Amino acid sequence: MTEIPSAQRATQHAGDSSATPADSGEAEHVAQPHGSSQHELSEHGPSEHDRPADGGSERSASSIHMQGLHKRFGNSTVALDGVDLTIQAGEFFTLLGPSGCGKTTLLRILAGLEEADDGRLTIGQRDVTDVPPHQRSVNTVFQSYALFPHLSVRENLAFGLKMRGVDRQQREERVARIAQFIQLGDLIDRRIDQLSGGQRQRIALARALVCEPDVLLLDEPLSALDAGLRSQLQVELLRVQKRLGMTFVFVTHDQDEAMVMSDRIAVLNGGTIQQVGPPRDVYERPVNAFVARFMGHDNLYPISRREGDRVTTELGELVLEPGTAGSDELLLIRPETLDVLPGTQQGANHLHGRVVERLYRGSHAEFRLAVGAATIQATINNRGHRLPEVDDEVTLVVAAEDLVTVAA
Amino acid sequence: MRKRTLKRGLTGFWWLTLVFLYLPLAVVVMFSFNAANSAASMTGFSLRWYHQLFANDQIMSAFGNTLVLALASSLIALAIGCLIGYGMYRHRHRKLGWLIVLIYLPIVLPDIVFGISEMAFFVKLHELTGWFKPGLGTMIIAHVTFQIPFVALIVYSRFVGLDPTLFEAAKDLYATPIKRVVHFMLPTIKPALISAFFLSFTLSVDDFVISFFTSGPESATLPIYIWGAIKKGVSPEINAIATLMIAAVALAAVASLAINRRKA
């Protein structure tokens, strides 16, 4: 991939996550609260010429602050119920949750396509709560890609620049540069109806990136693609974001995708944020049962008694790491933290069970085991050892530090 | 065996249909080139009826009226119908079907009922205001009223066929409301606008009854002129007019087909 020269600078800016002075200046430049794009043309057009042709624009990523965002549809449906969230400049941030959790509504409020009923939204240094979408320096990659059918690929890419009043020569240069950056090759001269899903996705990405927005929003952009292409484009998207250092806000319902791509994840449910943190935190230390289940954890057991670091569940008594804080409601044991030993062995945090089901997956095997009246899942890496068979009596061992308590 | 008979029967029916559709037209076209002033026998090839036609001031004025009426009413109907079509699309969640029925109702009424009521209405308006004197103006108004629903429906169905996020993409890509219209909506619905225009134009040229009741003495269109002329018998001149109209319609049909094909 070829580097966009401005990208290097942007990446450096992104390092210090606080909003720099250049940040606020840029925000003013790109979209004035009252100025139409035509005004921008007359006021800022010439200064664009003065810049070195390769430099694009001097820019840095923008942070986003959301404060008490509320949104309801009709009288009954609450889409967002008081969202407070800060997204750092240059961050790859993911809004994760099931359908109807409010993640798309939140993204649409960021884009300006939906208005919050209450709350404030700041992008960079600028309060954009009441700014219409065409005056926000924010671009969206839509789930359906939303490429204009009456325009060629090239014209689609140039659309945003044209609307902003960037002159023809500049437009052509920037379109050519982004086409090279996203490696569109000869796609650029095609008609929209001649493109495959994956190609459309990349055109949609390029069309949004060419405008060099402060923030790029991505609304489940990969959900329509098949698995192979999907993981390939995940990598590509991540690379693009790291090179440009732009703030990306990504919406998905796929927790694997969220973990692969994100610097931080916000898990939403019922219009409220359940947990915000880096993928490891969200996966390994979910704060409540919803997050745990959404991240794919099934081994959740109500704690019937807790005395110091000792907890009792239907599995039996287990010892937590000393000083384990958190709620006393549920115990989470991740399947991959369990060791499966043959026979019946004694020790702390040793559970005795019987293999009920085994799913062989090549690199690893998944087991369902009966421990007393409870069932538990365990995942074992296939290192060539003998894998337990169904009906084998085995001992499950879990380290104290891998046990997590979770709110209900 | 029975299947083959059925197939042959259907093919025969198809050809019969075509014969009844096109043979009368062919006869008219043929007799327009007849050397003799007769609707009974061809005596030779001649363009004299066409010469007479273009020398006839009444026909030329009727032709001019038809053209002005069709062009003006189609353009006005296009503008208004386009707005209605977009409005229906914008507020499609509000169940506005009754609105369409409301504008459609006059169309499904017999033309003669619509024509007579328009006439009475315009006469009354003229008495009251001094404006709306029966003539090209009233005819244009009457034509626009029956063209609007067709335009609105064509434009509406084009909008409905679009991905709704396209509208959001245009906003997202910095297009102001006016730029959205100029650079997104109009180019996107252009094929619909073209076919709506052709349809309106044809409807206008086609119309006799409503034109007849809303016209004034100076504003006879070709159909009205022909109606007046055939009371004295079908002259070869009429055949010539008819032939020219057939040619024009065929040309328009081919053009609209070509435009559609290029778009698809």
Image (cartoon, coloured by chain):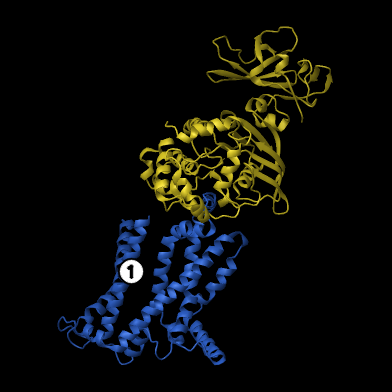
Chain colours: A yellow, B blue
Chain of the residue under label 1: B
Q: Position of residue B223 (x, y in %)?
A: 36, 83
In the image, A279: left or right of B227?
right
- Relative vertical location of residue A330 with respect to residue B175 in this rendering, above or below: above
- Point 37% across, 38% down: residue: A185
- Point 57% across, 72% down: residue: B102
Judged from the image, the secondary structure of the residue bearing numbered disc 1 is helix
Q: Position of residue A292 (x, y in %)?
A: 69, 29
Pointer 1 residue: B252
- Point 52% across, 65% down: residue: B85
In the image, B54: left or right of A299?
left
Between A357 and A146, the one nearer to me in the picture: A146
Quarter occupied by the C terminus of chain A: top right
Q: Position of residue B256 (x, y in %)?
A: 35, 64
- Point 66% across, 32% down: residue: A294
- Relative vertical location of residue B171 with respect to residue A400 in this rendering, above or below: below
In the displayed orientation, state which residue is furthest to the left.
B44
Quarter occupied by the N terminus of chain A: top left
Question: Label 1 is placed on what type of residue?
Answer: Ala
